[in-house]
Amino acid sequence: MNIKKAFSTAKISMLTLSCSAFLFAANSCNTKTELMDKSQEKIRLITLDPGHFHAALLQKSMYNEIDSVVHIYAPDGSELDNHMKLVESYNTRAEDPTSWKFEIYKGSDYLEKMFSEKAGNVVIISGNNKSKSKYITMAIDSGLNVLADKPLAIDNEGFKSLETAFTTAKNNKVLLYDIMTERYNIYYMLQREISQDTELFGVLEKGSLDNPAVMQESVHHFYKNVSGKPLTRPAWFFDVEQEGHGLVDITTHMVDIIQWACFPEVTLDYKQDIKMLTAREWPTQITSAQFLKSTKKDKYPDYLQKYVNNDVLNVLSNGEMNYTIKDLHARISIKWNFESPEGTGDTHFSQMRGTKANLIIKQGKDQQFKPVLYIDPLRNPEKVIMDGIVRLQVKYPGVAIKKSGKLWEVVIPEKYKVGHEDHFAEVAKKYLQYLKSGQLPEWEVPNMLAKYYTTTQALEMAKDSK
């Protein structure tokens, strides 16, 4: 997919945004004419304290609507250096290089400097999750739009802060949005699409605690490659007080997919629709040698010492939650290993149980550790499956099926298989559309709140269960 070409067709207009969303040096816009003049300005990015590599992935592509000069405010150190190296690798790659330029301020007063200069109108936040609530609140209060990496909240206090931030964003006419890349994963897209075909899938089962209607499981790794090179993790990534427990981090994506697939464009009310049933967590053990390999640091910092036993670091990165969303039973499981076996990577499992068929995404050894979408026909005759695929082909030409034991494998053309790193450009494209219209879909904010309520409630229950 030519992401750069896709972006070049869009024209960003800020007519519906308030003047506070534009923090340029010009005078405040007081008339319709001045507002129209502002609409011709390009989006100007501010990258705030980029401690996570996702901030760089948003710059893997160029966008006509966004000024090529990015203003960066961060403390001096290895995290900023690693961010700049990754973005610079996109600028210097042989094929389709980017052309980002930078205005960098580094120092202990980076926050004060950022808000005094007001050099842009969209803030990218991707780093230490302990600071994220504060960063989001300050940016929204200052009239800046925010595109933030998940999770936006890692505990109850963070969730309450997020609720306030969304209210303030509405009042200030700015947009706060999180980066949900998995919505652009073709396997989840097709699973969602087929689940809406009542002739093939039926309707979702309600499920039970022992046999949920929907399941999401994921295995991730502390040591991995990003853009073809080994990723250096910051030491704080191993501190659940800064990164977040496993139940509130990657699980954000899985909760989001369940909401997005099972209740497409349905507005959820977390106070009525979400009920946590069970939750637990357990640690991944990291040796000092593994810690060195991942962080390039030869000893555990002081803030990690409370998790160390016999020179082994115990990270509460694994967890499971069972809950109901409306009356649907759901289960989410997250597991972190240090490093994946050779030739493999992060893996995912997803299941939606319908009254006429089940939809399953597997990514195990039998699938060569690559995701595969299956249809379990249950009692459906072959013709029903075939007719369903014909209907699917209207929206996704080239998709086919083939028999795989008792299941049907959905055969997906390579053109639809956009890699995870390129999903960040898809998120940016969607966010630019929202900026153009001046608003998010009505269901997005309530469903973001439902999502973070689910994860933070799971953490609270897991803590209480101990």
Image (cartoon, grey):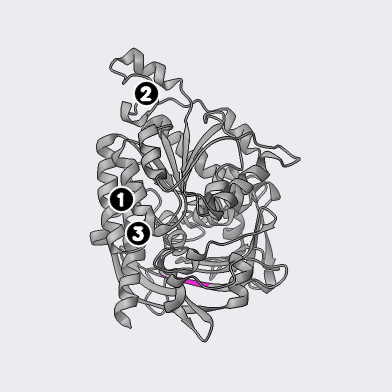
Whether tag 2 and tag 1 are in contact, CB under 8 A, the answer is: no
**Place of residue 46 in the rendered image (x, y in percent of width and height, measured from the top left):** 46, 38
Instruction: Indicate which disc, 2 or 1, sits on the residue closer to the N terminus.
Output: 2
> Of helix, strand and loop, which one carries label 2?
loop
Answer above or below: position of 339 versus 398. below
> Of helix, strand and loop, which one carries label 1?
helix
For the residue marked with disc 3, what is the amino acid?
Answer: Tyr
Furthest toward the bottom, the residue is 310
Q: Is residue 363 visible?
A: no
Count of marks overlaid on the render: 3
Region of the chain picked out in magenta, as a range: 331-335
**Residue named by callout 2:** 15
Q: Is residue 165 visible?
A: yes
Give the dominant element type of the magenta stretch: helix, strand or loop.
strand
Query: Which of the two discs, 3 and 1, sits closer to the camera?
Result: 3
**Place of residue 282 in the rendered image (x, y in percent of width and height, measured from the top left):** 45, 79
Residue 400 placement: quadrant: bottom right
For the residue marked with disc 2, what is the amino acid?
Answer: Leu
In the rendered image, which quarter contains the C terminus? bottom left
**Residue named by callout 1:** 446
Find out whether residue 427 is within the magenta segment. no
Mark 1 crowd level (few <14, some 14–19, many ≥20, 10 Å Cα): some
Instruction: Indicate which disc, 2 or 3, sits on the residue closer to the N terminus.
Output: 2
63 sits left or right of 157 in the view: right
**Residue named by callout 3:** 452
**Place of residue 172 in the rendered image (x, y in percent of width and height, measured from the top left):** 27, 35
**Place of residue 236 in the rendered image (x, y in percent of width and height, measured from the top left):** 47, 64
For the residue marked with disc 1, what is the amino acid?
Answer: Pro
Identify the residue shown where x is 61% and y is 43%. Answer: 60
Mark 3 crowd level (few <14, some 14–19, many ≥20, 10 Å Cα): many
Find out whether residue 334 is within the magenta segment. yes
Identify the residue shown where x is 60% and y is 60%. Answer: 232
